[in-house]
Amino acid sequence: MQLPPQIVIHRAAEEIGGSCIEISSGVNRILLDFGLPLSAAKEKKAAHEYRLPLDGAYKDQTPQFDAVFLTHAHPDHYGLLAELNPEIPVYAGRATINLLQNVAPLYGISLSHLRFVTISPGETVKYGSISVTAIAVDHSAPQAFAYQVETAGKTILYTGDLRAHGKCGYLTHGLARYAEPDYMLMEGTTLSRPGKISETESELQLRLEKEFSAAGLPVIYFSSQNLDRFVSVYKATRALKKTLVIDPYTCYVLEQFRHLGRNIPQWNWRGIRVYFAPNSITEKLEERIFRYAGRKISLKDILLHPEQFVIKDNFSIRHSLLKRSADIHLIHSSWEGYLKEEDNAFIQDALTHNLPISVIHTSGHGDYNTLRSLVNKLSPRLLIPVHTECPGRYGELFDVPVRVLKNGEVLFLQNQPQTENRTADSVA
């Protein structure tokens, strides 16, 4: 029996992360993202234990989906791919695919059974009665996408994760040209703190300059895959005529972004040196690590002139430095929630050595003002919360009709949005 066209949020209707959205035309079916919940990082369970009730999506089933479209390479958006049926193609930007094929295996995540297909910004892919267009947006992951889906005479806009205060903020502002979608599924990660205005990446870069010029050898923690943050750290370092020390893993990650343009920093750029951190990741890169040998620097060289360097943190170099020098300046440039985790080694080292931590970070997600501006410009006929802990607040915060879905609840597309109601808890 053919079902009518519909939208189903299988996960992330009332939580941040674990995103998985199905759009069906009645004949064709696609998935937007295929992620693990954020809790999976600590629970250490096998991926199959997080399977959603999606018959025809998994590797031990007959495929019933035409494709998966990924927004970006964060595990809460791709982490369930290990369970995906290999006959179902996975579309994503080249940077995302590079990370999943080349970097994810370093952490024991094997996706070699999957068929990845590169999709470029502005490109449209059609599967029968479903048309999907990739739209570049600003996020802390490089080459992040939103998607516009057209089916059954309706237009659906899925924002994925986005912001407008990063170095590519203009991309998110460009979403305005996709005005008046019938349905807009918009992330609301920051809406639990709607009064907070996010610092721009450029403002953060200036704060980093000041921090790097303070006394002590700066050791800064941030994700190697956060390209915006790497650029901010690198530019702040160069402004002070200092040298940024990174590890082989970061060198390798930067290579995955080389195709994005000539202005993407690489390990062999001026002002970058490489510390060969003895860890499992370095061992896995053994076959290509010789490429970085010409930029190698020793711990002795760093400690001889510490005022000349900024250190990209990793466990190995941090511990080596702490054993030999008390004049270390710790900086945390990532989600502040990590600082509350009891098993966070960065925090434990700071406590053990009685070192303060400077927090210099800006979110990878849009603040309330950004999201409100986006909704006002796009004027969707129906706004649907996703990737948020407070879906019930959308009706209070945005001046368009809002429909709150539960995980697994069906929204049938032939039903016109009930614009007289600001919010509704049920749709089926």
Image (cartoon, helix red, strand yellow):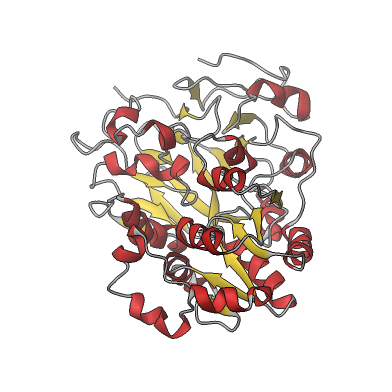
Where residue 63 appears, x then y in whole percent? 24, 38
Q: Quadrant of the N terminus?
A: top left
Q: What residue is at 64 percent from the left and 24 percent from the top?
A: 391
Question: Horizontal placement of 137 versus 125: left or right?
Answer: right
Where residue 200 appears, x then y in whole percent? 75, 55
Q: Is residue 264 visible?
A: no
In front: 385, or 399? 385
Question: Horizontal placement of 217 versus 210: left or right?
Answer: left
Above or below residue 187? Residue 135 is below
Q: What residue is at 77 percent from the left and 65 percent from the top?
A: 214
Q: Quadrant of residue 207?
A: bottom right
Q: What residue is at 36 percent from the left and 60 percent from the top?
A: 279
In front: 208, or 69? 208
Question: Horizontal placement of 85 versus 155: left or right?
Answer: left
Question: Horizontal placement of 427 versus 46: left or right?
Answer: right
Above or below residue 177? Residue 302 is below
In front: 421, or 340? 340
Where residue 235 appears, x then y in whole percent? 68, 72
Q: Is residue 406 visible?
A: yes
